[in-house]
Amino acid sequence: MGCLVGKTQLALKYATMSYQLKRYSLVFWISGATVEKLNQGLAKVLNLIDHPDRYHVEQSTKLTSARRWLEECSAMYPTKWLLVFDNVTRKHSLSSRAFASHQFDGNILLTTRIKVVAEGVVSAAEQQHQFFELMAPNIHDAVKLLLKEAGINPNKRIASTSKDLVECLGASH
């Protein structure tokens, strides 16, 4: 579970393609690395939509306004949105879990390295949601992919060095 296997890159690709295909008219990307970053990101949603509460002194008011806007924006605007919480940690999964239990006319995509965080958010939501576990490729497939993407013809020396590099990056045996 602790390997880096492209969760953020996959989420970014999905968000970009969905926006280009006009599935979403707004995409918000919020770091979930710390509680502070998560709260700052939610508050910044107000700046992006020019909400009157964006200048409010109280952080709790900004967070409430951001959630309320996400809940009610479809009634006011023909807006479908995607909110990405990237790299959510166990430490503050309760914040994201409470957020996931709200009813929205958009979609929330959450990335995390911790399976229990994903399971907790999914189980806390009142609707049916899914989570996908990304696994590191095996070492042989990872070396082949690396060499192919780099445009390198494999030989024994390059394959050995590539194997060492891939192992450092976290492929499984």
Image: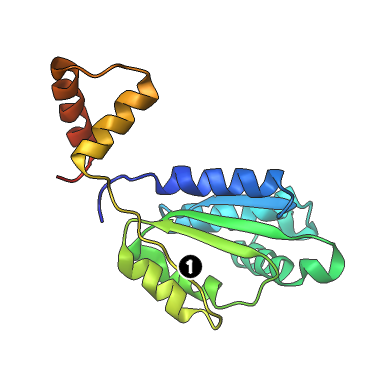
Q: Residue furthest bottom?
A: 126
Dividing the image into 4 quarters, which one contains the N terminus? bottom left
**Residue 154 at x, y percent in the picture:** 24, 19
**Residue at the image position 71 percent from the left and 72 percent from the top:** 71
Q: How is the image coloured?
A: rainbow
**Residue at the image position 53 percent from the left and 58 percent from the top:** 39
**Residue at the image position 46 percent from the left and 80 percent from the top:** 124
**Residue 76 at x, y percent in the picture:** 86, 67
Q: Nearer the viewer, residue 135 or 124?
A: 135
Determine whether, in the image, residue 126 is placed left or right of residue 157.
right
Determine whether, in the image, residue 15 is placed left or right of residue 48.
left
The part of the image, by quadrant, that contains residue 83 is: bottom right
Query: Quick one: SS at disc 1?
Result: helix
Q: The residue under label 1 is which amino acid type?
A: Ser
Q: Nearer the viewer, residue 106 or 157?
A: 157
**Residue 55 at x, y percent in the picture:** 72, 53
Determine whether, in the image, residue 110 is placed left or right of residue 154.
right
**Residue at the image position 70 percent from the left and 70 percent from the top:** 105
Badge 1 crowding class, 10 Å Cα cut-off, few under 14, some 14 to 19, many 20 or more, is many
Dividing the image into 4 quarters, which one contains the C terminus? top left
How many tags in the picture? 1
Determine whether, in the image, residue 103 is placed left or right of residue 168.
right
Q: Nearer the viewer, residue 131 or 64?
A: 131
From the image, tell me which residue sits under label 1. 96
**Residue 119 at x, y percent in the picture:** 38, 72
In the image, is residue 141 above or below residue 36? above
